[in-house]
Image (tube, helix red, strand yellow):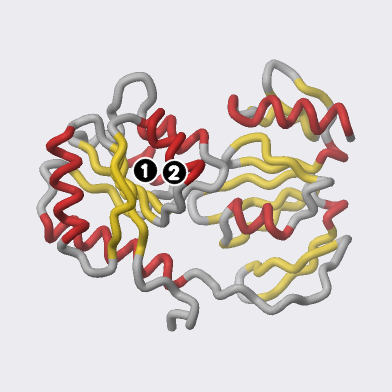
Amino acid sequence: MPNSAAPTTLRCLVVDDDPLAIQVIQNCITHTDFLESVGACSSAIEAAAALRTTPVDLLFLDVDMPEMSGLDLLDTLTEPPMVVLVTSSRDYAVAAFEHRVVDYVVKPVAYARFLKAAQKALETAQAAPAPAAAAPVSTDHTFVKVDSKLVRVAFDDVHYVEALGDYVHIVLGQQKLIVYSTMRAVEEKFPPQQFVRIHRSTIVNLRYVQAIDDNAVVIDGKHLPIGQTYLRDVLQRLNKF
């Protein structure tokens, strides 16, 4: 059941290098009572700047754009809004899954198909858990749900965390916990002074970093690639740790 704080209106940004495509999506937004347009951008670069200053709940995003693609834009965002990919190609289904987009709509866009994608976004937003009341924060452990039980995880035991579809793998040496979660939720639970995100799909415990080798973090002999947008922060954190 949606929580009482669930949004009833989603603020939308349209990103496409085709003016006609922008007009079509904007018209669809106008005809959808739970959507509100906050603007449109003709390039991913322009959108990146807009997202820094404009609150956005839902991004209607083209993929093939000059200079920076829509998927490249998503790779630069640490906390992206919900995304509906709108593209003339059917070849991005795997990439859409990897980026956890809400839906994938192929041009030309019919309103019925647009509405289905918009409703999925609204349901996703309304299903998000309500902010919990403030509670004492543990400094050394957290609990994660594995299958049907809550498992206590000490932060010092976690070597790294990897995303895989709708799940994350929490690696504790030879043990691996498979948890239904997002990387954002992991970041919120794990102490930032001890953990750093090195890729949109990887968070590592700084205590277990053995080396940096060719833009990869080495933990337990495994090379974990560093995303280009995270490289500077990772190096700074390692120097300060």
Residue plotted at (46% across, 35% down): 49
Residue plotted at (16% across, 57% down): 113
Res. 99 mark = 2
Cα distance between the residues tagged 2 and 1: 5 Å
User: Count of labels shown?
Assistant: 2
Give residue 189's position: percent from left, percent from top: 72, 60
- Nearer the observer, 209 or 187: 187
User: Circle 1 sits in a helix, a strand or a loop, which is it?
Assistant: helix
- Nearer the observer, 167 or 128: 128
Q: Is residue 108 above or below residue 167?
A: above
Residue plotted at (78% across, 65% down): 142
Give residue 4's position: percent from left, percent from top: 48, 82
Q: Which residue is mark 1?
A: 96
Q: Residues within 10 Å of mark 1 (few under 14, many from 20)?
A: some
Give residue 53's position: percent from left, percent from top: 49, 44
Residue plotted at (57% across, 62% down): 180
Query: What amino acid is labelled 1 in the image?
Result: Ala
Q: Quadrant of the C terminus?
A: top right
Q: Is residue 109 above or below residue 188?
A: above
Query: What amino acid is labelled 2 in the image?
Result: His
Res. 27 mark = none
In the rendered structure, the answer to whether residue 166 lies left or right of residue 34 reads right
Which picture quadrant has residue 118?
bottom left
Badges 2 and 1: C-beta atoms under 8 Å apart?
Answer: yes
In the rendered structure, the answer to whether residue 26 lies left or right of residue 84 reads left
- Nearer the observer, 84 or 205: 84
User: Circle 2 sits in a helix, a strand or a loop, which is it?
Assistant: loop
Give residue 222's position: percent from left, percent from top: 72, 30
In the rendered structure, the answer to whether residue 200 lies left or right of residue 220 reads left
